Amino acid sequence: MKPALYFVEHLTLRAWVFNLWPRFFWSRIRKENQVIRCYVIDGSQLSMLLARGSAWIIGIAVEALAFSLVDVQDESGALIGLRILHQDMEEVQQSVMAEPEYQELGRRTPLQDRLPIFLAKSITSAIWTDRSTTWRALLLVQVSAWKTKQMENESVRPFLVLDRRPWINAITKYAHQNGVTIIPVRPAVSLRAILRRRVHPEVINTLRILRYRWRQQGLLSSVQNLVWPKPAAPINDQSSLKEHPGNSTQGPTPMVAVEYYGQLNLNHPELHSNLFFWQTSSMPGRDILLTFAYPADPLDEQKWAELKQHGIGAAVLHPGATTLPHIPVFTHRPVRNQTHLEGVPTAPGGLEQAWLNEQLANYQMLRDYWTHLFDLYGVKVYVTWSKNGGTHCAIADALQSLGGVTAIYQRSYESHSSPETTVGADIVFGFSPAVAEIERRSNSVIQYHVTTGYMGDHRFPLLKSKAQIVRDQLQQQGAKHILCYTDENSGDDSRWHTGHPFMQKNYAFLLEKLMSNPWLGLVIKPKTPQNLRHRLGPVAELLKVAEASGRCHVFEGGPIQGNYPPAAAGLAADVAIHGHLGAGTAGVELALAGIPTLLLDREGWPTSPLYQLGKGQVVFTNWEQLWEACTQHWTTPGGIPGFGDWSSMLDELDPFRDGRAAERMGTYVQWLIEGFQSGLDRESIMADAAERYCAMWGRDKITEVNSARSSPYPDSGIVSGQSAR
């Protein structure tokens, strides 16, 4: 009789009564498998109570499985959650694309444009809050294997009871390769999911508008706005509302659309801004349209006044994304189950076919929405950083259908290829040519990859005065050596994200060192300062004491993410510490700003190329070693050679390092929009801009990524024509 461990993704009464308990009962009667324990990942209190009581009768313990993402590592010490993103996910993606249902879609459907990339990225969604994603399924496979190995009994077999989801065969194959047996069960009924599938999108859209307008104006005004809606025209500096584009016989002036994501700061170029590239260019504000879609930071009087000051237009895309009752919201009448692609068949039943139909419908609705938006406002260039999902593919296809160009800029340091970061766009602005190679391995399709350098380097000299003020304040309170610390945020649920307890240990170590060493100063730059105290929990009291000492300064401000860049804190310090390697952008910025920068890898990401900088000199795996190195550095005349030194990698990170990266991008975007305003076609405009850029900065600074191939997924059976062309 072989011992077995069971892991249940989501325990429901149905799954227990009809799937699990009968299996356990007959296994015990027939003496087939000795069930050692049944671990539950998620489940209601009622389900757990029933399961524990009835399992006790047959001698089986049922308990909730406690684990943290940061504890689940492989034999090399690599965090498995990160490894799945950069390695395992691609293997499963290819397995899915080889399945008959997926292949049949490619044979029956002339998929065009960027739809193949959209579908491929939909397979590998890594939204950690979504219980139905492939990423979570793969992680649970690895958690099951990891927990089983802790039994130190090689004969124990892990079984994972997983909610049935699309492409379960590929997940089952992956699990088998890792020694885990999948038992698929019917998932719990989701009333919300049923309603979203059954209720027409136009009804959902209407209810959403009513919900937010009711909050702002009251029910009567909300209904009146729905019955007699105002035209959704953009705001600019010349009038309260621009004339509706449809009233113009010549059509709207070609514009550059940029999404707003919590960082305006138009009059503070030293801070993060969603229009950073415009700030360093000579492009007039009237050529810019800023889109507002986040209720967490809506368009208000202050932002409106700032936009009007510079003549920048605004379009509100979500009813909760403005507090101004007189501002119209762009509305689109969504139509479900249609497609631009002629002859696309509706697939027959089955989870996989239903998934494919749903993705085709999503792509269609997204493309229709953005086509309507761009056409209404005369958008010819769309600039964004968002590429992790497939939405940007539908956006790029929508704009291309109108003769426009989509440009994506690199916001984060990327060291590994990943299906999550696959791009399908006309232009990508990246830090260095090395990024183009990573994009190639990620199966991106990019007509022009433009190397600009690190996008935030223009802020470094602008931040020095603020940094000096902070430094002087700390020194006046007795700080002789000053550390800077930057974090990478944390999540409420430690199972799916770097959790708050993990982050609290980082802060607790530094704050305790600060309080026990009166000669130490500390400058903190959290990624999301607005929730720092919440994330710190009990450590927040220690932070309060540290701030009261006058030797601790926290850079705050920013409704979604911080307004101050990492360099603001680093330039006030002697040594900077970035607490993560899986997300190393802050560390890269600090090093490019000329600050001795250390990296702390407590999570475990030894495959990072940043380890080449030297373990014990730049990279450390625990706080004790890092602190010992700092104290040794400070007590050594002239410091430890190579301590915090990134010089061997700076050329690879940014071949320019001249403070002009944003200027280069802004100038490039300006060339594009000027071409459209001159009446040229998109291919000529892009070719001309590339030629001008190469003449100024060198032909090695523009690279074509996979765009000459028929498909970024040659083995999928799907042909995409000329992809991004």
Image: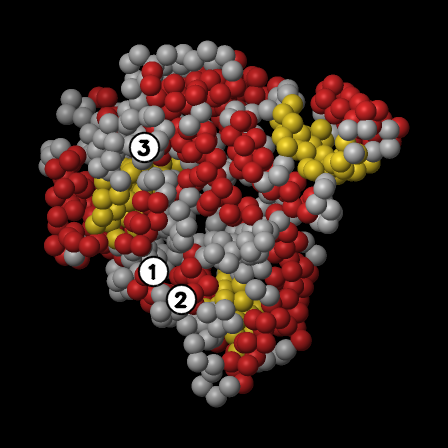
Mark 2 to mark 1 CA distance (whole Å): 10 Å
User: Could you tell which of marks 2 and 1 lies nearer the N-terminus?
Assistant: 2
What residue is shown with label 2? 591
What residue is shown with label 1? 653
Q: Which label was assigned to residue 714?
A: 3
Mark in front: 1 vs 3: 3
Q: Where is 358 relative to 273, above or below?
A: above
- Quadrant location of the C terminus in the rendered image: top left
Please state the horizontal and vertical placement of residue 367, each as a whole percent of the image.
33, 25
Mark 2: give few (<14), some (14-19) or many (20+) Cα within 10 Å. Answer: many
Q: Indicate left or right for 284 with 306 as reference.
A: left
Visual colour scheme: secondary structure
Three-letter code for the amino acid on which mark 2 is drawn: Ala
Please state the horizontal and vertical placement of residue 634, each as a whole percent of the image.
52, 82
Please state the horizontal and vertical placement of residue 134, each as a whole percent of the image.
53, 33
Q: Indicate left or right for 292 with 540 as reference.
A: left
Q: Which label was assigned to residue 508?
A: none
- Disc 3 is placed on an element classified as loop
Of residues 583 and 575, the one drawn nearer to the viewer in this rendering: 583
User: Could you tell which of marks 3 and 2 lies nearer the N-terminus?
Assistant: 2
Which residue occupies the extreme right position in the image?
57
Which residue occupies the extreme front position in the image?
1
